[in-house]
Image: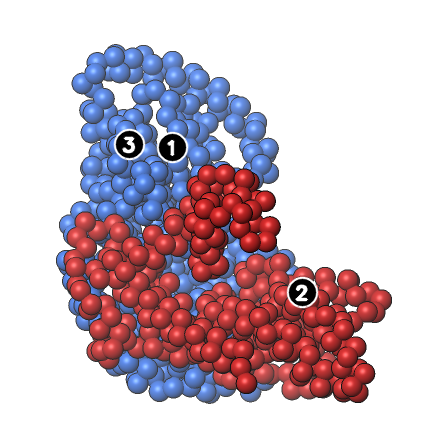
Amino acid sequence: MTNSTSPLQASPLSRRTVLSGALGLAGIGALAACGSGSSGVPGQAPAVSAGGGATGYTGPKVALQFWNGFTGGDGPFMKRLVDQFNSEHPNISVSMNTMQWADYYAKLPAAVTAGKGPDIGIMHVDSVATNAARNVIQPLDDVATALKLSEADFAPVPWKAGIYNGKRYSIPLDVHPLGFFYNKDVMEKGGLDPEKPPMTNDEYMAALEKMKSKGIQGHWATPFPFTGSMSVQSLIWQFGGNLFSDDAKQVLWADEPGVKALTWFQDLVTKGYSAGKIAQDADIVALQNGKTAFNWNGIWTINTLKEKGDLKWGVAPLPNIGGTKAAWAGSHQFILPTSRTPDQNKQTAARVFLNWISNKSIEWAKGGQVPARNSVRESAEFKALKDQATLATQIDYLHFPPPVAGIGDAIPEFEKALNAAILGGQDPKTVLSDAAGRATKILEANAKKYGG
Amino acid sequence: MAVTVTQPQRPSSGATPAPGGRRSRGRTASVHGSRWTPYLFLAPFLVLFLTFVAVPGVFGIWISLHDWDFLLPKKPFVGLQNYTDLLDSSSPQFQPFWNGMKATAIFVVISVPFLVTLPLLLAILLGRRFPGRTFFRAVFFAPFVLGVAVVGLMWRYLLDPSFGMVNGMLGALGLPDSTAWTTEQPWAWISLAFVTVWWTIGFNAVIYLAGLADIPVEQYEAADIDGASAWQKLRYVTLPGLRPVLIFVVITTVLASANMFGQSYLITKGGPGDSTRTAIMEITDLGLSQYRMGQASAMSYVLAVFLALIALVNFWLLREKKS
């Protein structure tokens, strides 16, 4: 919907573009001094690539295609970064192509097979393993070593998630965790202190009960993946459980922690803390309309709520309901799609781009994300983004699905169970076990298919 | 479609050796020129048909005999296993597939009667002469030009149980305003059928209108002279006169309803539970998001066989009864 390549973004940047373009020209002279020698020697070109982009790119002008699915409010932030990169790198021109994520994931494999894939892409962490197994994306170990990127540079959770079968396939850009959003006006109306959101199970229940006595349904429980499934997944980890075993051979969500988690969520409805039978997104709409006080939603909600000028809201890390701190998160990761006819120059330039954006991810954080790169996340500039920084405190206890090919095929079964429990009022243990049974078969079929 | 298109080939073989043929055909023989002429005229359609229907149709059978992921180098041949799995309750695709088939059947049964009868009544109304007739024809046809994404999203908002305009207006009228239109059965099915009727009523109505225009006025005049009532005219003049149109409408409507995807994908998200996940939804999910194209192809062929059988039954039920 939001076309990130809208000309609107270009005009306010023109002055800067011109300025940095001039700087860039000056830079060419400097680069040419050291670059002309190496580019004259035919054998030197691969050496540049072996540099993995660490030494910059000095070859002839190349055009790179960059695909992503940032169709929402995040698109313009990425577009701005790309524009800035282009103006600082006169011999690399990156053009960004934004499409719906669903289309992106369908198009990318087809484009790669046809030899028309982009040079750089973004991928959600839970899709990396599948696409690695299907040869859609290429290993990036050389980039990591060349750019001297290591676990120390990144938050460990998203960094480790980019490894499949012992090889690195993606470099984390951000994490987008679930957070606890609250409407201060409604809290006040419900007799709560709006500056002190409940952070433990006891406090949370007491708050909900208090609001219920004033006729407010405090936490609307949505039966849909966004963000009901993410909430219940967080709860499973909080209760000490997991969705899958680490090798993804077993489905564990029907074990005790899973049943506890879904029961807790279902109780929001049965105990009258939530409206029943609500539709997609009604929970967050209710928060904005002052119908409910609490909502667990993704960090991207920060920008949605900011647009509501008169809404008094706050955000905190997820309350610890189950006893162990944990929260669901997604992560955008850089990937380099497989190329049928590898072009050394493009490969090098793509790596330069990747490293540059990673270092500049503070701009990206403003779009409602937590930067994965430590240097950025620990910078004063990021700490000044108070809401994002609050949710970034969860960085060490965020969870992703195991990096196993086809893991995304099993999660819809969990979501069916959630829907049946919340909308159909069915017994959590029964629906979870049924779903686990179906998901186990899918995982077995996947293990056979991908040879894992 | 294939049947009607291949028919013109038959006269072409007989056209050349019959220069003095019956009726006026001889006069046009020179226009026919070479016997390749008909094929030339057919070529544009034939190319599209072969590329997008015939070849994929046959290639799909080949795919359905394999564990097929177009990106994996290994595509093991599995024989008929993808088909037998659909009958084996321990296979991963058994439950989703038959649940999808059931949902598809439910939707066909509840939507087709309305999609066939309401447009007919509308066409009869719009066939009368009254001021603003063209305007109303346009009004009723208008929703059909909308894409499914627009229709789905719009009705998802309108039917939202908590904040939707439908419940809001019911409430303003003092009627129950908490019906869960999209998140509880049977309301979810009712909503989907209603939205589909609203969306496509104009299309069938236009076809009926064309059919009605073909019924000779004399038949109605004769019926008037015989003193037939309005009902009798409908039963004995209009319906028999519409038979070929009716067959077309019933068959295309059954197929369209059996292919329902966008409405439940957007409005109910397949819920509540998995009750509105249609067969097409399962096939799409399996083939294009889980990349199990062999299994998805097998499902498609089973669905196609079911639909072909239903189309045959329709032909048989609506055949001209020779007394």
- Residue under the image location 64 percent in, 78 percent down: B239
Closest to the camera, between mark 2 and mark 3, is 2
Give whichever of discs 1 and 3 has the lower sequence position: 1
User: On the image, numbered disc 3 is attached to which residue?
Assistant: A347
- Look at label 3 and name its amino acid: Gln
Vertical side of B1 occupied by B177: above or below: below
Same-chain status of marks 1 and 2: no
Residue at (47%, 52%) from the top-left corner? Answer: B11
Q: Which residue is mark 1?
A: A64
Relative horizontal placement of residue B138, taking residue A15 as reference (left or right)? right
Residue A97 location in percent, x, y?
A: 45, 41
Q: Is residue B40 visible?
A: no
Asked if marks 1 and 3 touch (Cβ < 8 Å), the reply is no
Rendered hue of chain B is red
**Front in this rendered view, residue A363 or B157:** B157
Marks 2/3: CA distance? 61 Å
Mark 2 touches mark 3? (CB < 8 Å)? no
Q: Residues within 10 Å of mark 3 (few under 14, many from 20)?
A: many
Query: What separation in Å lies between label 1 and label 3 (alpha carbons)?
Result: 9 Å
Residue B83 rendering spot, x and y as whole percentages: 24, 70
The residue shown at (20%, 24%) is A47
Q: What residue is pinned by disc 2?
A: B210
Q: Position of residue B259 (x, y in %)?
A: 45, 68
Name the image quarter holding residue A421: bottom left
Q: The disc numbered 1 marks a residue on which chain?
A: A
Specify the amino acid type for callout 2: Ala
Return the chain for callout 2. B
Q: Mark 1 belongs to which amino acid?
A: Leu
Q: Is A394 placed above or below A348 here?
A: below
